[in-house]
Amino acid sequence: MRVSWSQGPSKAGFTLVELLVVIAIIGTLVGLLLPAVQAAREAARRSACSNNLKQLGLALANHEGARKNVPAWGQEFTTAEGAAMSPPSPYFNLTADARKPFGVLGQILPYMEGGTIYNMFNHKRPLLDPLNLPPPWPGGQQQTGALATVPAFICPSTPSVPSDYQPYFAALGVTQPFLMPRTDYVPIRGLHSSLATCVGLPATNTHNGMLGAENIITNRWVKYSQVIDGLSKTICFIEEAGKQQRFYRGRPLPASAPGGNLVLNSFYGDWNVARHTRGLSGANPADPRAAGCGVINVLNDDNPYAFHPGGVSIVRGDASVGFLQQDVDTFVFAALVSRDGGESLEDSQ
């Protein structure tokens, strides 16, 4: 008997061409979706950054409500106060920086659930004092508080940057890495240098911001009633992110870059020493070493700078947050910085 076998339909596999087509389609889809995913992540980071600034604005308002004033950009103990310190503060007479207490960010900690960190320090002594600083500072005794990172002071869009202050303190006997927690936000003192002259103000007019004070020894405090332009029209904190490293138009500057201390520049980049912020000074979009009228996202040295596309986050005196586009008019920006310039502005972003 003859038996015939019939073959069923055979299952054909992918050809190489078909496989390449599928891979190309998947690659195209990934290419289309990735920017959207990245944009969504940045939107979340920017929202968190705005939340941080909101906390700072509310803490400042709570400080004013409780004490009828807010701390100025910088303060300084008097000679008499220094003489009364026991034990004596060893660096008090060496430099003005060694006579300064905590800055604005440190002083508003109790009004933003940071009282535990605040209470670790002796606020009757300067910050640059062995009782308030950790080892390897000579005689340093305060390790926990001085090294504490405050999450509300860090913008999640900012990359990790160096935090070693040893080069600044080498002359005082610091020979090992000396790490300090940073801040990406700074208080507004006023305008300074080329940015002031760009809008017709004296180059040294550094005290016209919401937290400016002309004499940080005898006039350490600012009242909300001094903000004549209105709290909703005046910036109190702004991003100056990425310190201690220097960033210029989105790129880190190399350590060998000319023009002074272009990398470890930020003696004022940590949250507790950030009390000595200079006025916002302007930058040159064509040269990081030159003065200019550039305002936002040009250079992160005494200038508004963020790692958000297109601008920086701010908080105003009424604790409302906003986002300033990096192409903002220089005169508009100057008006938002000054507390008593009398400028007439439409509602800012």
Image (tube, grey):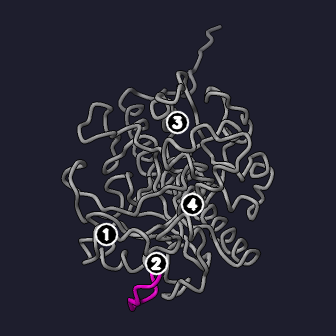
User: Residue 290, percent across and down?
Assistant: 20, 53
Q: Nearer the viewer, mark 4 or mark 3?
A: 4
Q: Which residue is mark 3?
A: 163
Q: Residues within 10 Å of mark 1 (few under 14, many from 20)?
A: few
User: Residue 315, percent across and down?
Assistant: 55, 71
Q: Earlier in the sequence, mark 3 or mark 1?
A: 3
Q: CA distance from mark 4 to mark 3?
A: 24 Å
Amino acid type assigned to the residue bearing label 2 in the image = Gln
Q: CA distance from mark 3 to mark 2?
A: 32 Å
User: Residue 216, percent across and down?
Assistant: 53, 64
Q: Earlier in the sequence, mark 4 or mark 2?
A: 4
Taking the spot 65% from the left edge, 7% from the top edge, the residue there is 1
Question: Any magenta on residue 340?
Answer: yes
Q: Secondary structure at mark 3?
A: loop
- Residue stretch in magenta: 339-349
Q: Is residue 87 left or right of residue 238?
A: right
Q: Which residue is mark 2?
A: 349
Q: Earlier in the sequence, mark 3 or mark 2?
A: 3
Q: Nearer the viewer, mark 4 or mark 2?
A: 4
Q: CA distance from mark 1 to mark 2?
A: 12 Å
Taking the spot 60% from the left edge, 82% from the top edge, the residue there is 224
Q: Secondary structure at mark 1?
A: loop
Q: Nearer the viewer, mark 4 or mark 1?
A: 4
Q: Which residue is mark 4?
A: 75
Q: Are marks 3 and 1 in contact (CB under 8 Å)?
A: no
Q: Secondary structure at mark 2?
A: loop
- Seen from the viewer's position, the closer of residues 294 and 173 is 173
Q: CA distance from mark 4 to mark 1?
A: 33 Å
Amino acid type assigned to the residue bearing label 1 in the image = Asp
Question: Any magenta on residue 172?
Answer: no
